[in-house]
Image (spheres, rainbow, N blue to C red):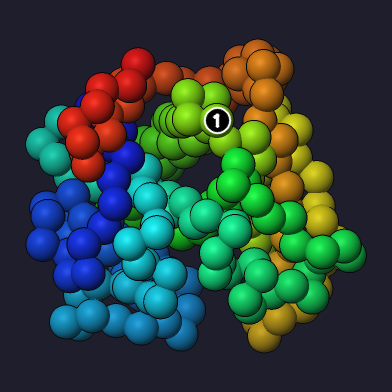
Amino acid sequence: MQTSLARAPQVPEDAAFRAMFAARKQVFVDLLKWDLLILADEYEVDQFDNPDAEYLILLGDCGGHRASARLLPTDRSHLLDDLYPFLCDEPVPSGPTIREITRFCLDRHQSTSERRIARNQLVTALAQHALNSGITDYTGVAELSWFSQILRFGWQCVPLGKAVRVGHQTLVALHIRIDERTLDGLRGTGVYTPLSLQLIGNREARA
């Protein structure tokens, strides 16, 4: 198994990207019934899947999608600032060392235990990537029940405002601080599950 950090092309031609965008459609559109743009009746792609976005993609031994997340720079257009600023009591956190986590996706064709392992591996990869690359903070928007899980992972996570009912969901904006204590926090809750990390774009290997 491996986790890859990459930048997406405009059209999902690479196998890892095809698998990720297809999994996003199966989870967010088919399962959760979100009203999202679908490309070629198979891939979930939106306006934030642009050259500024980065992706952590966790693949199985045969290259199948297991989990993935999109990271958006917050000093440019991103979801929380563009669509959900009303979720924040203060100005939306932004800056060159802050990334927004979006489209945290666990492949639905896994057992409950497999999804839990994939979730823990992806959370660990997010923390390790941040520490390796100088990211100090993550932000995001989560449905209330998912936010309750995120709070229990062991990292420093706080809401940026009150939970707000939006359509059929109750949403919370969140802020995660990443520092030298983060991995110990994940270890303390049993979430820490490391994998190797490879940057696809320039083939730079990350431990």
Q: Residue at x 37, y 43 (%)?
A: 56
Above/below status of 181 relative to 49: above
Expressed as whole percent of the image width and height from the top left, the position of residue 94 reads: 68, 55
Q: Confirm whether residue 104 shows in the render.
A: no
Mark 1 residue crowding within 10 angstroms, few (<14) / some (14–19) / many (20+): few
The correct choice, above or below, for 45 with respect to 197 in the image is below
Coordinates of residue 49 in the picture (x, y in percent): 36, 67
Give coordinates of residue 50: x percent, y percent: 35, 67
Q: Residue at x 81, y 52 (%)?
A: 159
Residue 14 visible somewhere in the drawing: yes
**In-front residue for pair 163/145:** 163
Q: Determine which quarter of the picture holds residue 21.
A: bottom left
Q: Residue at x 33, y 62 (%)?
A: 51
Q: Residue at x 59, y 47 (%)?
A: 96
> In the rendered view, does 142 fall on the left or right side of 175?
left
Between 113 and 143, which is closer to the camera in this rendering? 143
Q: Is residue 136 left or right of residue 162?
A: left
Number of residue marks = 1
* Vertical order, 30 against 97 (above or below): below
Is residue 51 shown left or right of residue 142? left
Indicate the amino acid at tag 1: Gly
Q: Estimate the x, y position of residue 38 in percent, counting from the top left.
A: 29, 81
Quadrant where the image shows the N terminus: top left
Q: Specify the quadrant that holds the C terminus.
A: top left
> Which residue is identified by label 1?
134
Q: Secondary structure at mark 1?
A: loop
**Front residue (pair 62, 76):** 76
